[in-house]
Amino acid sequence: MTTLLTLNCTLLLGALAWGQTPPQLNLMPMPSTVQAGSGQVLIEQSFSVAVTGFHDASLERGIRTFEARLSRQTGIPFRPSAAKSGATLTIHADHGREAVQKAGEDESYELAVAESGAKLTAPTPLGILHGLETFLQLVQTTPNGFAVPAVAIKDQPRFPWRGLLIDVSRHFIPLDVLKRNLDGMAAVKMNVLHWHLSDDQGFRVESKKFPRLHEMGSEGLYYTQDEIREFIAYAHDRGIRVVPEFDTPGHSRSWFAGYPELASGPGPFTLETASAESVTDPTREETYNFLDKFIGEMARLFPDAYFHIGGDEVNGKYWDANPKIQAFKQAHGMKTNQDLQAYYDQRLQKILAKHHKTMIGWDEILHPDLPKSIVVQSWRGQASLATAAKQGYSGLLSHGYYLDLMWPAARHYAVDPMSDAAATLSPEEKKSILGGEACMWAEWVTPENIDSHIWPRNAAIAERLWSPQEVTDVDSMYARMNAVSLDLEWLGLTHRSARMHMLHRMAGAEDISALRTLADVVEPEKDYTRWDESKGGIDFHAPLNRMIDAVYPESDVARRFGSLVQAYIQSGYKDQASEAQIRAMLTAWRDNDAKLHALLQQSFLLQETAPLSEDLSALGVAGLQALDALAKGEPPAESWRAQQLTLVERARTGKADLFLMIVAPVKQLIDASASPAKSN
Amino acid sequence: MTTLLTLNCTLLLGALAWGQTPPQLNLMPMPSTVQAGSGQVLIEQSFSVAVTGFHDASLERGIRTFEARLSRQTGIPFRPSAAKSGATLTIHADHGREAVQKAGEDESYELAVAESGAKLTAPTPLGILHGLETFLQLVQTTPNGFAVPAVAIKDQPRFPWRGLLIDVSRHFIPLDVLKRNLDGMAAVKMNVLHWHLSDDQGFRVESKKFPRLHEMGSEGLYYTQDEIREFIAYAHDRGIRVVPEFDTPGHSRSWFAGYPELASGPGPFTLETASAESVTDPTREETYNFLDKFIGEMARLFPDAYFHIGGDEVNGKYWDANPKIQAFKQAHGMKTNQDLQAYYDQRLQKILAKHHKTMIGWDEILHPDLPKSIVVQSWRGQASLATAAKQGYSGLLSHGYYLDLMWPAARHYAVDPMSDAAATLSPEEKKSILGGEACMWAEWVTPENIDSHIWPRNAAIAERLWSPQEVTDVDSMYARMNAVSLDLEWLGLTHRSARMHMLHRMAGAEDISALRTLADVVEPEKDYTRWDESKGGIDFHAPLNRMIDAVYPESDVARRFGSLVQAYIQSGYKDQASEAQIRAMLTAWRDNDAKLHALLQQSFLLQETAPLSEDLSALGVAGLQALDALAKGEPPAESWRAQQLTLVERARTGKADLFLMIVAPVKQLIDASASPAKSN
């Protein structure tokens, strides 16, 4: 018996033989359709793969990588020389994929698992790669062995463009770190790495035509052209396109370090925050000669059809301050700096077209003088995207997907490229919304903690861009995201392990259990509140080794505590299982500061968190008193409640750029205890 | 004020400003002399290194590696371009080191740290490398920043040969895993990697002269000659010699897969356990022609002056079964197979001498016909070593240092190359004992868990071979070893993290806290009891993903519990701090099976551990009852005690090849509770 499962709730298989509680399918992103069967395929040492239909070296590499990962995940060394009588998994692709992966290329696949074996079919190896990731997510530990449940999956992406931007300018990110992030992207079926390769703080690509770009603009931290070619091949083998971004005419101080003549104002320019600032001079023909040669070189290096020129946040004051540029504007009848930028972008677009590239840029490049072929990436929102679409421009959504804002996964998950203004578009106009990109801006991340700022939250965005629009159940998303998060560790991602290393460093001690209890319930400052102009320029060479740099952007413990409190209150204080868990958590917090106090004082990196630890224990006490009152049904004195609310106000305030995320649910308990009958 | 500290107790600095309790110096191996000063040097972003005296590219690489590690350890990105006014650390080497590192080369160094800066001096960069490791171990997290305390260290090794054998035949270990182990060896000042490159189960080196060796003897898992050259250079940069071992005439089935004519008996030979067995035929001249060419090739590939030919465990039955070999023995007047092996070893030694190599072999090569230049590595013990020394042979101790026996660190630590029979040697004879080697035989390890089988216990052996003989305090050793263990994680070693991955795999779940509680108190079977002949041959392709493969060889939790029980009993049951900790641990164990039971049933890999989990909870109950009785001073009924001893007997029995290591201390509590007055 098979059942067609609905998509917007956690998938549970009812017909399986392996336990009292049927296991959840931890698929993320959720496929288009999933039909559960009965039975399972065991993954044993005899596991084998057979390929029928199309076959090439890239598919072969994909299968070898898959086998190695399955081996790592299960601890079973498959025998390379084992005889293959009746393969466990049969793979069939109809024909080959594009030599250079195209936006919109068919990515669909079908995966059928039955007792007799699994069959994965797809039009091209691109779909096969996605299906292999699905297969890996299906592998479960059961009483009888590692197994994949019988299931029939038909799957294809909702949007053709599902990207992750990684900024390697503000902090250089080495290729091994990027590669493991490509592995993570492939695991959640993202297909575009948007490589933000230059900005004020660093120019990260070797240029043979203009070597002073990387020599003077990178402090020695750049990728060679050979490395880039190898990296692009690595991405291609994982079904991922690499789109380069060279931001211009703003965000380009690093270009000017070696080529100050490109700037609108006087230097000298260095990578330091204290250096002179400027933007590119769009009035000199030499600028376009430079760009033509440079883009020609980069167009050969990066095979993707798209080329990102940035174009965002151009500060017009540097143009205003240059009399020659003012004269140029006047001579050409330009009224605003926007007009001047449009002129620049048009020139750029022609150069790109000459080199067979399609231009992408941020919202600011949108101007009626630009051809409809360009793609607008929106950091402003769906309205901006809808405006572009109505004018016939293609677009990508990034507003709402900025990972550096430290939002919870659910908040990103709720952002849909087709919502708000975009929902009002005609079906034809909607086609021009190609998808979206998560953005990992690197002001506050290093190779050490970038993984934990991308993962696992990026998996929620990946699901938004791949899965049907109706897949929106947040509890299901969190359950599956947490499972995928564990899987990602097998790829070498350090989003969980790095925190432990960093806590050990701060503590300078082996036993960090109490420190971890504190770290588990705090979250960093949200949005861009960590820094403001009053603090001066950001020092991009400063150590990022504080608690704020170590903790997860989202506290899973606090989220679960909130859910428990919710369930307990909604039960009319009768849900004893929830109460017991709440009590255990509050007790641990109450007792934590006593364990932690001395350690915090002994470390210059931890001293700033001492008030947080004290607040946590105070909240534990308050929460337990409220819980006792609720359990007994005896409201506490009004004076007690007033005291507690003072505490809550104090605890709500950020300290050490961190927030205690259990304040709100503890307050709920306090409020409820004052008038328990109301909720009853 | 400075104080000369004694060496055989934990080092405490009395004169430091940074806290109520002076921090311990976590140096391992303990230097020859350590003199504490007052004050400290802060490690900040301005940290800089200046080199005076000798300077070459290898020293430069050593310093760059040191800086990168200091940066990782502190999270501080040092500025490559920072101006250097008054270096934090000044390095001075008198002259260069040998191009090919020699056994006995001067490894001494002096490190002086004062408020004004640190100075590291050594005869050669070899000592500098060791001193830089000491410096890294001195870095501490303090209330004022990362700091190195003022100290004056003069250091040199006790033995010139401090090795680690890694067997890459039984399970192939990739170079990246070996490299991080080289990093770990350098951190604890070991200076020889003994690379066990061939055995029955695999021949792991590319041979251009005899390509069927690696083609047919490795299942494709071997190192190319280019890789080996690069690896040896990597080791050299870390002050480590690489000594190759090609085991012959026994342990050599993998040679016969491609060259069956070398064997004493008929094949066919494969790498499988079920394959025909044999040993090399020492009677054919073709064998020596082969070995001459092969050793010539390998002598050029491996620059070290020593070459290990194995020579152990030669099974004479294969010679007895061959009439031609019997005839040869008779013709040459050889009475025993030992004589025949001595003939073979003599021929081998002449070939090695021709290629400018000194022969090393296991105990069995010791024979009066062999020249005094050979080195005997003893798996048999100090008596064997002493016998060799008296005959004028050099020796290395490995008996007592076999990491695969799963002994606790303290047991290895107690083994001294100069003890027992070796203690009776004359001073001159003692010089021929060059040191020792830890041995990581790879029957039961894979790239996934080899780190945890080597580390941190290998650090205790490293200390035995480097530090003065009087350094024997076990508590100090454990305290420092645990600190070093954390440091080793910064080198990428996975001795701690792999266990978590493996527990997650077995559990197939995110929350593994209860599973970890169980894993924390068990140890694997000791010695070679995991396997015996009755189980047939070991399948070297079988998965090693059970609990026994995941847990640490030594339970730190059980060791600490034992110490607490000891302290509590010795206090006459008055030590309340110990009692509280004992109670907390017993309570957690008592409650653990209830949390864990369902999880264990759902995983085929965990089911076998269910009885252990039940025993653990029962021991928790029994221990708490005993503790209550002791606290009240009321002996329990004799019937209760009898019941508990039945439980103890049951819990003492190994299950799933694991032992609960808290049985003995719980029994101590039970015994004590029956007659508390006795211990009072």
Image (cartoon, coloured by chain):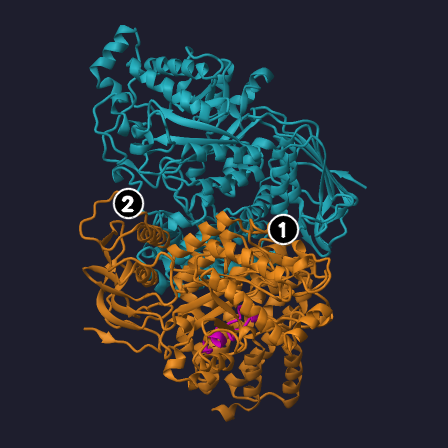
Chain colours: A cyan, B orange
Q: Are marks 1 and 2 on the same chain?
A: yes
* Residue pictured at 31% horizontal, 70% vertical: B21
Mark carried by residue B270: none
Quadrant in the picture for the N terminus of chain A: top right
* Residue B635 drawn above or below residue A442: below
Using the rendered image of the protein, determine whether residue A519 is visible from the camera's viewpoint.
Answer: no
Amino acid at circle 1 = Arg
Determine which residue is flagged by label 1.
B212
Using the rendered image of the protein, determine whether residue B556 is visible from the camera's viewpoint.
Answer: yes
Front: mark 1 or 2: 1
* Residue pictured at 64% horizontal, 58% vertical: B254
Looking at the image, residue B455 sits to the left or right of residue A249; the answer is right
Determine which residue is flagged by label 2.
B79
The segment highlighted magenta reads: B399-416
Looking at the image, residue A445 sits to the left or right of residue A421; the answer is left
Q: Residues within 10 Å of mark 2 (few under 14, many from 20)?
A: some
* Residue pictured at 58% horizontal, 84% vertical: B670
* Residue pictured at 71% horizontal, 57% vertical: A143
Q: Position of residue B166 (x, y in %)?
A: 52, 62
* 1 or 2: tag closer to the N-terminus: 2
Q: Position of residue B311 (x, y in %)?
A: 57, 69
- Of residues A414 and B386, the one nearer the viewer is B386
Q: Residues within 10 Å of mark 1 (few under 14, many from 20)?
A: some
Element at label 1 = helix
Q: In the picture, residue B418 is in which quadrant? A: bottom left
Asked if the stretch drawn in magenta spans residue A130, the answer is: no
* Residue A49 drawn above or below residue B74: above
Q: Chain of mark 1?
A: B
Q: Position of residue B250 (x, y in %)?
A: 62, 67
